[in-house]
Image (cartoon, grey):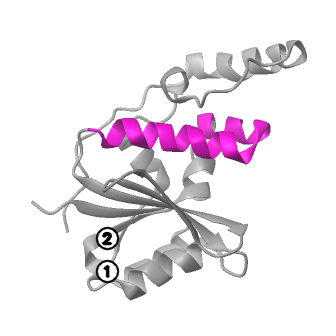
Amino acid sequence: MKPQKVIIDGYNLIYADDELKRFIAHDLESARNALINRLKAYLEQKALLVTVVFDGRGGLTDAEAVLPTKLQILFSRHDQSADELIIDILRDAPNPREFIVVTSDTFDIGRAASSLGAQVIPSEDFLKRIGGKGTSSETSPEKPPPADEDIEFWLDAFSADEDSEENPSGGDLPKN
């Protein structure tokens, strides 16, 4: 069986998850690392090829294979948005219908991806599949403990999760 190809609008997915969004208060790299760690755990037993696209670091498109043959991270060029890079990937693909695009931006990128034949899944639905929200102890990037002045902030932030409903993690993504 051929693995399903998934392209994720990285920051869109981060902002769709309350837990990942909290990392942004620390810095963008922490949020990206938390998402990547969550994806790595999810992909261990899945037949998926995932590309996460973030708005760029400045120069040429920057790519990193996090899990060879399963997970690739791309950063768009300084003159290109992540949305534009995702559409370019689909346009350059021999068969864009093989792709699932994960984004909640259904007006811009969702519409463009659909018009090329890709399936579009809202970020919130994808997060449910990968065990989104409430898995911070398993997916947090390694970083020093918070300073004393940050402890109250973190206690308040994480105590809100105790009342949240667990999201079921489902099976594999639908086939085209």
The stretch of residues the image draws in magenta is 19-44
Q: Residue furthest right?
A: 149
Asked if 73 appears above or below 141 in the picture, the reply is below
In the rendered image, the residue lying farthest to the left is 1
Label 2 packing within 10 angstroms: few (<14), some (14-19), many (20+): many
In the picture, the disc for residue 96 is 1
Q: x, y (%) of residue 161?
A: 59, 22
Residue appearing at x 84%, y 19% in the figure: 150
At x 23%, y 39%, the residue is 45
Q: Count the marks: how many?
A: 2
Question: Horizontal placement of 141 versus 166: left or right?
Answer: right
Cα–Cα span, label 2 and label 1: 6 Å
Looking at the rendering, in which quadrant would you find the N terminus? bottom left
Disc sitting over residue 111 in the figure: none
Which percent across, then down, holds residue 91?
41, 87
Q: Confirm whether the magenta stretch covers residue 39.
A: yes
